[in-house]
Image: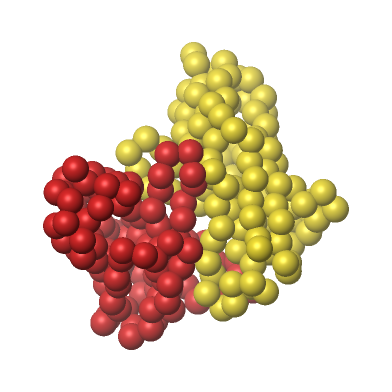
Amino acid sequence: NAGVTQTPKFRILKIGQSMTLQCTQDMNHNYMYWYRQDPGMGLKLIYYSVGAGITDKGEVPNGYNVSRSTTEDFPLRLELAAPSQTSVYFCASSYPVTGGNQPQHFGDGTRLSIL
Amino acid sequence: GNSVTQMEGPVTLSEEAFLTINCTYTATGYPSLFWYVQYPGEGLQLLLKATKADDKGSNKGFEATYRKETTSFHLEKGSVQVSDSAVYFCALSDPLEGGATNKLIFGTGTLLAVQP
């Protein structure tokens, strides 16, 4: 069982470059999420999606874009990389909520450094 | 808005010691509460959950009880092992504020280091 797969695992970018972080899940989950994890700060929600063709901003969306053309894939795009975007990025997915008690399943993360 | 506060780490214990990691929350509605664990170099894994007041979640010897009167969800384990060394995150999902989105709000995480 693959679960949630993120690629790449590590990446170094120069300021101003762009890249796409890939995320795919094979659990047929409708809901998907992107988080960033900064040291001592917990996880912050960047964007989320409740189904193909539907995306919405989370707590820290500036500097990022997403798309959801299929149930399986939810790529995160950085258009103009900035040092403040150095972080570990996690993708997660879950079944639709029923009373808010569905756990999220996480990928192993992408460690991104911008120099 | 909703928030989660958990004790700062690192928490350093000897093997077989008793563990408590405190977690308190602020929520508009009636949230579900979760503990996630992150082992080095890996993503987060669900450890346990509780969906209503007085529920006790348990898994792998860890327990946490949903206390509405104290707005707490403290994580406990009677005898820790070296393999329990990880970062532990308390989180909540509040349908009243998040709607039907299942969004999670996380605490800052607590690093646990267990020494042999």
Please, which colouring scheme is shown? by chain
Instruction: Give residue A60's position: percent from left, percent from top.
Output: 43, 61
Res. B40 image quadrant: top left
Q: Is residue A82 above or below residue A28?
A: above
- The residue lying furthest to the bottom in this view is A53
The reply to whether residue A86 is in sight is yes
Picture layout, residue B64 above or below residue A76: above
Task: Name the spot of residue B82 as percent of width and height, x first.
Answer: 48, 23
The image shows residue A31 at horizontal and vertical percentages of 43, 73
Q: Which chain is yellow?
A: B
Residue B9 relative to residue B57: left or right: left
In the rendered picture, chain A carries what hue?
A: red
Q: Which residue is at a point 21% across and 65% down the rendered structure image?
A: A79
Q: Is residue B86 left or right of residue A81?
A: right
Picture residue at 46% right of the left edge, 33% below the top: B86
Closer to the camera, A98 or A34?
Answer: A34
Q: Is residue A1 left or right of residue A96?
A: left
Residue A11 visible to the viewer: no
